[in-house]
Amino acid sequence: MRRLGALLCAAVLALAGAPVAGAVEPWFGNSVGTATQVISVVGVGGSKAMMDVYQRDATGWQAVAAGIPASIGANGMAAETHDGNMATPMGVFSLDFAFGTAPNPGGGLQYVQITDNNHWWDGDVKSPTYNTMQVCQKAQCPFNTDPASGTENLNISAYKHAVVMGVNKARIPGNGGAFFIHTTDGGPTAGCVAIDDAKLVQIMQWLRPGAVIAVAK
């Protein structure tokens, strides 16, 4: 346990750059239940947002990183999301697991490395595995792999590193899927949250199961 504590402390210091003194009362304080790690994303206009990172201990909430520029959906944020609306969903969502084309950078979340073109995020609304990661060769996939269906092949540069946001976990067809925090290419997203890859790696190394992301205008 002492070794784990040391690792967590090192991760926080690396993420923060410098300690942020004093407990704060963040905007999401009454919305995240018992979560002790929160990634806050607040829109600042258009497809831009600002990300802050918080952890909670016995003294309250502490900011461990602040003012991280983020790109969001080309159409900003929306209270409800639907396939094709190009907006980032507002609300509080779990951070379920991580993946990427790069090797696992470490951290507390399960990590799936994408090493080929056989990893997909199923966007086919007629598929029973809609809004889940699937592994299959294109010709053998039991769902529509055409990009027009909403299915994504995950072997792309924007997914050098990514964390899955638990949006539409009921997998209601048409209510949106494939929402991630991922590596930015500098432009707006189709509804994800994108940040600098080096900063994303630091956050991934810090994250532990039970962390959430809180998104608001």
Image (spheres, rainbow, N blue to C red):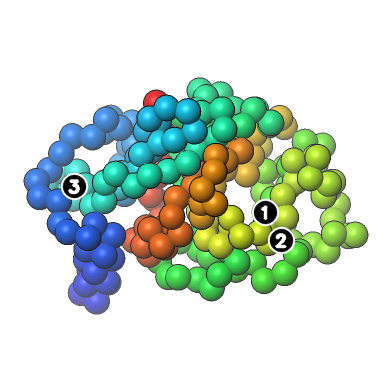
Q: Tell me, yes or no, whether the two marked residues, 3 and 1, touch with CB atoms within 8 Å.
A: no
Distance, label 2 to label 3, CA atoms, is 37 Å
Per the image, label 3 sits on a secondary structure element best described as strand
Contact flag, marks 2 and 1 (Cβ < 8 Å): yes
- Around disc 1, counting alpha carbons within 10 Å, would you say few (fewer than 14), some (14 to 19), or many (20 or more)? some
- Measure the alpha-carbon separation of dots 2 and 1: 7 Å
The mark nearer the N terminus, 2 or 3, is 3
Image position of 79 (left or right of 198): right
**Mark 3 or 1, nearer chain start:** 3
Task: Give the numbered dot on residue 133.
Answer: 1
Going by the numbered disc 1, the residue's amino acid type is: Met
Q: Nearer the viewer, mark 2 or mark 1?
A: 2
Q: Residue 62 location in percent, x, y?
A: 18, 47
Which residue occupies the extreme bottom position in the image? 3
| SS class, disc 1 | strand
* Along the line of sight, the residue nearer the viewer: 101 or 47: 47
Is 62 situated left or right of 148 in this image? left
Give the vertical position of 164 relative to 213 (above or below).
below
| Amino acid type at image mark 2 | His
Q: Nearer the viewer, residue 18 or 206?
A: 18
In the rendered image, is residue 176 in sight? yes
Q: Residue at x 75, y 64 (%)?
A: 117
Task: State the residue in front, 192 or 112.
Answer: 192
Relative placement, left or right, of 84 versus 104 is: right
Badge number at residue 119: 2
- Between disc 2 and disc 1, whose residue precedes? 2
